[in-house]
Amino acid sequence: MFGETGHGHVQLWRNAIVIVMCLLLGIAAIFLSSERRSALASSETRFVEQSESGLYIVPASCPSDPHYSGECTPTGGGCTISASPSSIQSGQASLLTWNVADQQGVAGVFSSPANISISSVGSVGQSGTVTVHPSQSTTYTLSGTYTLGGAGNSIQTGSFSCSATVSVDSADTCPAGTELRDGVCVRICPAGQHASGNICLCDATNEPPNSAGLCTQQACPEGFQFDSVSGQCVAVQQCSLPPVCSDETHALNQCTGITTNCVAVYGAGWSCLNGVCVEPPRPIASISAVPRLIRRGDTVNVAWTSSNTESCTVTGTNGDGGEGWTGRNGSRTSSAIFSQVVYTLVCQGLDDSIVTRRDTVNIIPIVDET
């Protein structure tokens, strides 16, 4: 009987050992399977961390007192872009300069900018410069997104956008009776005449028409020359007297006694110089606003100059202008500026042409960190 009892105890110890080994094998299987599980992600905080043992740590919801009561909204970030110069002539260049800041999220985790591009330029880096040659006024918009995580497991956490405008001045307006050819204003001539700069010459004689604008003679016989005032052939006299100016706009041929009205024959702005009718110089004008980049509510100094002009006026898209903003040269202080302002200078030349120049004042962007 004692032998049977001892044998029973041995059997119980064997069963206990088997049970313990099964439990240990089950725990090991659970641990190994946890290492093969895919990464978990929290929809609130959008990131996970891995412990030293390989387990994944999923943060609590944000905010979730008492687990986490910090700020959940990402801070920082934003972009800046500027154009220098912001106002150009057709064919000139402007330099775009930009920068995109990182965005800081929960617990100091940074979101990186991605998909960065500039309209009319294409994909660009986080910061840099590029030269542009717009043929017309163009607004360049820098935009992109903020992402968290690596390739294939990234999450968008925000976006950014900012812009800069390059204004392109069109070609100067030609005076009445002329048209722009290859960048130069030339006279529009009737049939039988051709343009030579800003005047018309008769095709047959290569001389100006008479005061009525007519070419009455095809050619003059030997010993005669065509008179542009009378429209007649006149005898060539042996005369050594030089032509002179009878006044600022009349040229006198001392040999024939014929006076030419420079304005009537050739157009507005023409004058007499050393007995010859000369074309008026083209008007020149410029305008500048200093500084071009200001804080909201600041003022700027607007200055303009011109030459070979009759009159000039300055206007601003913020309502500046009017009395005190006229004259061929001048300088004025703007009113308080709260948004982008374009100042335009318009001058009338001595030759009746119009020249236009512009300058732009931009506001320093404010990044909302809330």
Image (cartoon, grey):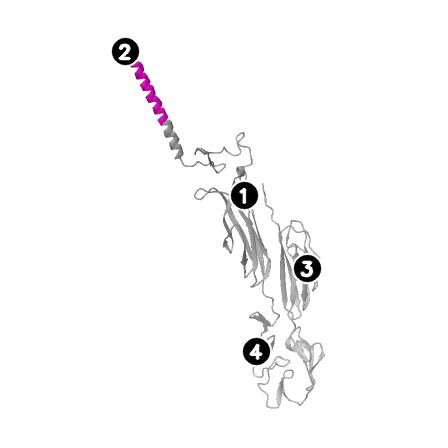
For the stretch drawn in magenta, the main secondary structure is: helix
Amino acid type, residue under disc 3 in the picture: Ala
Q: Secondary structure at mark 3?
A: strand
Type of the residue with mark 2: Gly
Q: Nearer the viewer, residue 2 or 155?
A: 2
- Give the distance between the C-alpha atoms of the residues marked 3 and 4, in whole angstroms: 42 Å
- Residue at image mark 4: 194
Tell which tag, 1 or 2, sits nearer the viewer: 2
Between the C-alphas of marks 3 and 2, the distance is 120 Å
Q: Amino acid at mark 1?
A: Gln
Image position of 56 with respect to 169: above or below: above
Indicate the position of residue 275 as horizontal and vertical percent values: 68, 80
Q: Nearer the viewer, residue 96 or 261?
A: 96
On the image, numbered disc 1 is attached to which residue? 103
* 80 vs 309: above or below: above
First in sequence, mark 1 or 2: give its number: 2
Mark 3 vs 1: CB contact within 8 A: no
Label 4 secondary element: strand
Spatial distance from mark 1 to mark 2, Cα to Cα?
80 Å
Q: Earlier in the sequence, mark 3 or mark 4?
A: 4
Q: Height in image: 284 above or below 334?
A: below
Binning the other alpha carbons within 10 Å of mark 2 as few (below 14), some (14 to 19) or many (20 upward) gives: few
Number of residues whose C-alpha sits closer than 10 Å to that of mark 3, classed few (under 14), some (14–19) or many (20 or more):
some
Which of the two discs, 3 and 4, sits closer to the camera? 3
The residue carrying pointer 1 sits among few (fewer than 14), some (14 to 19) or many (20 or more) residues within 10 Å by Cα, namely many
